[in-house]
Amino acid sequence: MKKSVSLLLALMLALACALPAFAESTATQFPALGMEITLPENAADMGLDVIAREDLMNLTFQDEETFTALLLVERMDNALYEQLMADETVSQSMTDAGMQVLGQQDTYTYIGFAASNYEDVADYFTLVLGVDYNAFSADTKAAIAAALPHVEAAASSLSMIPIVKEEKRVGAFTTTDLDGNEVTESIFSGYDLTVINVWGTFCGPCIGEMPELAQWHKELPENVQLIGLVSDVNEGGDVSAAQKILSDTCVEFVNLLSSNSLIPLLSMSQYVPTTYFVDSEGKMVADPIVGADVNGYKQFVEEYLK
């Protein structure tokens, strides 16, 4: 893909000539994300649907053969965006994939990627989605081709709206710890504050901060607990890699395995480590901290307890 995909400005004149009249359309707002998008009322008939959460919005195409995103919008902390852009390899790969900066709001930067009928869609699927467009059937290719002009129009309709923060909490869940003991949301009830560190066995920064977390756990006051959540080991799965990491880093605090009932929590962030802070009822009392930042965790806990 040699050209960047334009989400807001480019090719508008060409679209005006090429795209069927957008007479029947509906604007949908996602206040938690701070974004609005306009789609044709027959979007569902074309296999298009919008999935959104606080930090991400996907305009997806679905048929019997595939479920995949043709337009992605992500909201990330300004600091994280700047960190990613400072890495030349990451920055170049995101540019090659067609990343466009949609704007900034509050402390967030919005970026987007869109498949376009003016680009080689096979490259988009490979670069952004990691799937083989050429393996799709002729019917699926035709359906995607028919939808692409509407995806481009939807991309050009994107606009930011005021962010409305919603109360977030860890809902009811059931899982096990690494020793096979059943754990539910009742694990929060005996503490004024629980720090949940979501990590992965594949994640260098996650493992790198484990010794500090192990030491901090020993220093926490009695009304605060620290627990881990292993994002890439499901309940009933092979825990040997996670156990070795925890043993090697002298971690003694409880670590939970992922489960279907924890998917809502895990889907709140695309990155590990991500650390959440919840009260005795599982209500989140602060924005999560993305990235390894033990000093940041400590600072928040100290200020919260005051």
Image (tube, grey):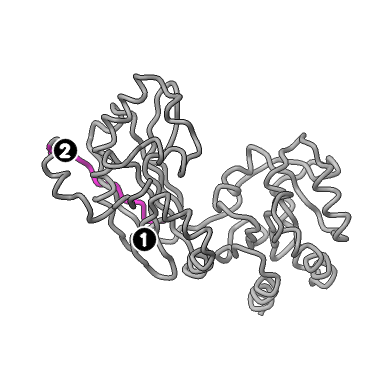
Return the x and y of residue 296 as percentages of the image width and height: 65, 73
Residue visible at 84% across and 48% down?
A: 243
Q: Nearer the viewer, residue 288 or 283?
A: 288
Q: Quadrant of residue 222?
A: bottom right
Alpha carbon distance from label 1 to label 2: 24 Å
Give the answer, above or below, for where 134 lies relative to 24.
above
Q: Secondary structure at mark 1?
A: strand
Magenta span covers which residues? 21-32
**Of pointers 1 and 2, the one earlier in the residue sequence:** 2
Residue visible at 38% across and 33% down?
A: 61
Q: Secondary structure at mark 2?
A: loop
Q: Are marks 1 and 2 in contact (CB under 8 Å)?
A: no
Residue visible at 37% across and 23% down?
A: 140
- Label placed on residue 101: 1
Would you say 157 lies left or right of 128 here? left
Q: Nearer the viewer, residue 223 or 151?
A: 151
Q: Which residue is mark 2?
A: 19
**Residue 286 in magenta stretch:** no
> Dot 1: within a 10 Å radius of its alpha carbon, few (fewer than 14), some, or many (20 or more) residues?
some
Identify which amino acid the numbered label 1 is placed on: Val
Q: Quadrant of residue 278?
A: bottom right
Return the x and y of residue 180 as percentages of the image width and height: 83, 40
Identify which amino acid the numbered label 2 is placed on: Leu
Give the answer, above or below, for where 278 lies relative to 259.
below
Residue visible at 46% across and 43% down?
A: 127
Give the answer, above or below, for where 202 lies relative to 129.
below
Return the x and y of residue 65 as percentages of the image width and height: 44, 22
